[in-house]
Image (cartoon, rainbow, N blue to C red):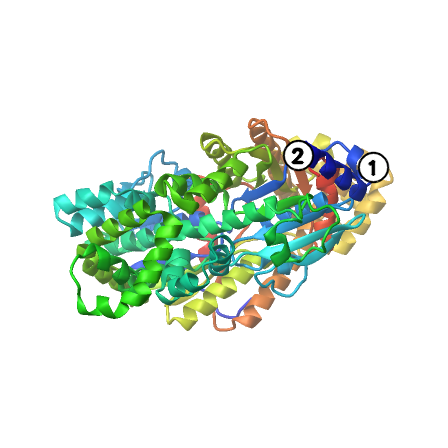
Amino acid sequence: MAAKTLDVDGLLADPATRVVVCCGSGGVGKTTLAAALGVRAAESGRRVVTLTIDPARRLAQSLGLTELDNTPRKVAGIKASRKAPGGELHAMMLDMKRTFDEIVEAHASPQKAAQILANPFYQSLSSSFAGTQEYMAMEKLGQLRKSDRWDLIVVDTPPSRSALDFLDAPGRLGRFLDGRFIRTLLVPAKAGGRGYAKVMQAGLGVMTGAMTRLLGAQLLTEVQTFVAAMDTMFGGLRERADATAKLLRAPGTAFVVVAAPEPDALREASYFVERLVEEDMPLAGVIMNRVHRTTVPQLSAGKALATAEALEGDGSQPSALAAGVLRTHAQRVQIQDSEQHKLAGFGLAHPKVRTTSAPAFAEDVHDLAGLRQLAAALCEG
Amino acid sequence: MIDGYARRVSSAARRGAAAQSRDRDWEGVRLHVVTGKGGTGKTTIAAALALALAAGGRRTLLVECEGRQGIARLFDAPPLPYAERKVAVAPENGMVYGLAIDPEEALLEYLELYYRAGRAGRALRKFGAIDFATTIAPGVRDVLLTGKAYEATRRKFSSRAARTAAAVPPSEYPDDYVYDAVVMDAPPTGRVARFLNVNAEVAGLARIGPVNKQAESIMRLIRSPQTVVHLVSLLEEMPVQETLDGIEELRSFDLPVGAVMVNRVHTSLLPSSALKGAAAGKLDVETLRQGLAAGGIKPDDDTVRGLAAEAHDHALQVSAQHRLLTKLKAAQRPMYQLPELDTDDIGRLYALASELAEQGAA
C-alpha cells in the first residue's frame, strides 16, 4: 500500500469540503460507500445530501428507503452526536427526464417549452438515450450546490460505459452547442440567407442531401424544428455546462476513487487517478473496498493446508471440523496475499495518491448500522 | 428450403457427428447477447461462451462495444483494431474471432456499405456530424453497435460484407453463415433493454427511409428465436436484484431472455454438519480445539477464536449464496453455475468454457 493514508474523517469534517464525488468502475461498492460517507458526515454534524444516479435503486435499498426521486428525502435514524449536533442526511435519486424538462421550462417561454417537450426527438433524447444521464447528473449537482441548502453533497457517479463519461459530459455539451453541425442544422430552419450560410452552401447541399437520404425528410425536419426551438436556450445551457465544469475543479470539491483489489477494478482506478491528475481535478484519494484480512496471521496458508490434509485421513469429527476450518483459513490467507500483492502494485504506480481501505463483509451492507460500520472501518484505514 | 438443407449438410460436415449429438440448450440461436451488472465478470463469461460455442469446428465472433479492449486483455492479444481478428483456438478446430467496435468507424463503414456515401460521408465528418452522431447523440451509437452485430450475425460467405471483412478464409459453401454464432459483450444490465430496443425507437422516429428499414430488420432479428440475452450475476444482493429486474425489463420490451450465468460460486469448505452452526455463530469451539491439537497446531485462545471467526464469515457467505441462488431460480431460466477461479490467465477462460459446455450452454 502507498505510504500516505487518506484521512476520510478529516475530509468529511472539513467545512471547506462541499462536494465529494465518488467515482470508480461498476461493482466495487461505490453506491454503498457514497451512502456510508453520507451517514458518517451527517453523524459528525453536517447537513448532507447524497445524490445517486443509478436506475437500479441501489441507494434506496442501502438506505432502507422505498422511494427515491428528484426530491431529496430525509433519511430517518441518523444519530446526532453530542459533540456535533445538527447533522442530517438527505438522499435522492436522479430523475433524468424530469431534470431535463425543468431546464427547458426554466429557459424557454411557456409556449416554446411546450413545443420542445412535445417534439419526438427531444422526448427520445431526454428519456432513453445513454449519455443524457451524465449531463443531467452534473446539472443536478450544479443545482444542489447552487441552492446552498447543504453543507456537503456526496455524489455517486453513473455506471457509465466509459467510466469517465461523466467528467466529459459538461464539456461535450458545450462543444455540441457551439458545434458547426448544430449551426448548420439551424440554417434551413431560419429562413433567410445569412452571410455565412452562403459560404457553406456547397457543403451544406451535400450534407442535407445525405441526411435526407439516411434519415428520411420527416426526421430531418423534426430534428431541425427541435434544434430551432432549443436555439433560444442554448446560451443558458452553455452557461450551465461551463459552470458545472468549473464547479468540478473548484476548491471544496473532492474526488474519491473507489476501487477493489481486483485487476479490472484497479486498472479502472488507475485510469481515473491519471485522468483526474491530468485534468487538474482535486483528487482526495482512493478507497480500496472489500479488502480481505485474516484474523490469524500467525498461521500460514501452507501449514494450514498441510495440517488439514493430515487430519482428513483420520475420520473423527474434531479432525473433520478442524480440517474444514483450516481450509477456510488457508483460502482467506491466499486471497489476502494475492490482494496485497495487487495493492502494492497500485501503490508503486501511484506513490503520491492517498489511500485507505475497507474490509470485505461476509454479508451485503444494506442498512444504516451496516453503513455506519463500513464508514468506521474506512476511517480507521 | 434447399438453402437450409445445403447449410445443414455443410455445417455437419465441418462439425463432425460427435459435437452435434450433444444436448445443447441454445440450438438455433445465432446471436448471444451477454449482459451483467458491472463487476460481475460479463466480459470474461462472454469470452468463455464464445470459446465454448466454437468447440467442434465452429467459428464464433466475440464482439465488444464499450471500448475497453477487454477481449484483447482476456486473450493476451495486442489491442484489437476495428477489424475482426482471430483471437483463440477452441477445442476440435474451433475458431474464436474478436471485434472491438469503434462507433465512428462503424458509422463510416455503414455509410459506405449501404449508401456508398464516400463523398457525403466525408462531408458529414467535416461538419462534425459523425462526431455528433457517435458522441453527442448516443442513441446513434447504440444503433451502430447493434447494427454491426446484426450484420455479422447475418453475414454469409456470398455477401458483399464477407468479402470486405475477409477475416475468415472463404468457404466452398457460399450460403453458409460466416459465423456459426456471434457473442456480444453488451452494456450492463441496467441499460441492456434500452440498448437492444434502440432500433424500435429509431424505427419510430425515422418512419421512412433506409434507416427505418435497417432498424426494422435489426429488431426482427433481436426478437426472433435466433437471439437470446444471457444475464451474468454474482451471488450478492445487488447483482441478484438487478438480474431479476433486468429479466423483467427485457420481458416487458418483448426481448428474448436466455440463461442466468452465476459467476464466482463458492463451495463450502466446512463439513455440512458444521455449516449451519457456524453461520449462526455457534461453531463448536471445543471440538475445533481438539481437532487442531490432533493436527499439531497449538490451540491457544487467539488462534481458536480467530479461526472460528473466519469460519463464521465463510459460513455466512455460503449460506447467503445459497439463499440468493434460490431467489434467482424463481426467474425460471436455465442457470449455469461457474466456480470462483483464482487464476488470471487464459487457462481460466478454457476452464469456464468447459464448465459452460458441460452444463449445456454450448
Residue B68 position in % (x across, y down): 54, 59
Instruction: Name the quarter where the N terminus of chain A is drawn.
Output: bottom right
The residue at which mark 1 appears reads as B17
Instruction: Identify the secondary structure beneath mark 1.
Output: helix
Query: Quick one: B311 or A298, which is closer to the camera?
Result: B311
**What residue is at 13 percent from the left and 44 percent from the top?**
A111
**Crowding at mark 1 (Cα within 10 Å: few <14, some 14-19, many 20+):** few
Residue bearing the label numbered 2: B28
Q: Are marks 2 and 1 in contact (CB under 8 Å)?
A: no
Mark 2 vs mark 1, CA separation in Å: 17 Å
Q: Residue furthest right?
A: A313
Residue A47 in sight from this viewpoint: no
In the rendering, at what x and y percent does residue A115 appear?
Answer: 19, 43
Q: Which amino acid, by three-letter code, is at mark 2?
A: Gly
Q: Is residue A188 left or right of residue B173?
A: left
User: Splitting the image into 4 quarters, where does residue B305 fall?
Assistant: top right
Chain containing mark 1: B
Q: What subunit carries mark 2?
A: B
Q: Which mark is residue A115?
A: none
Examine the image and state in which quarter residue A118 appears.
Answer: top left
Judged from the image, the secondary structure of the residue bearing numbered disc 2 is: loop
* Residue at left offset 83%, top offset 43%: A311
Residue B76: percent from left, percent from top? 68, 62
Mark 2 neighbour class, 10 Å CA radius: few under 14, some 14 to 19, many 20 or more: few
Residue A378 in sight in this render: yes
Query: Mark 2 or 1 closer to N-term?
Result: 1
Q: Closer to the camera, A36 or B48? A: B48
Give, as a three-letter code, the residue at label 1: Ala
Residue A61 picture location, percent across and down: 42, 38
Q: Residue at x 57, y 72 (%)?
A: A348
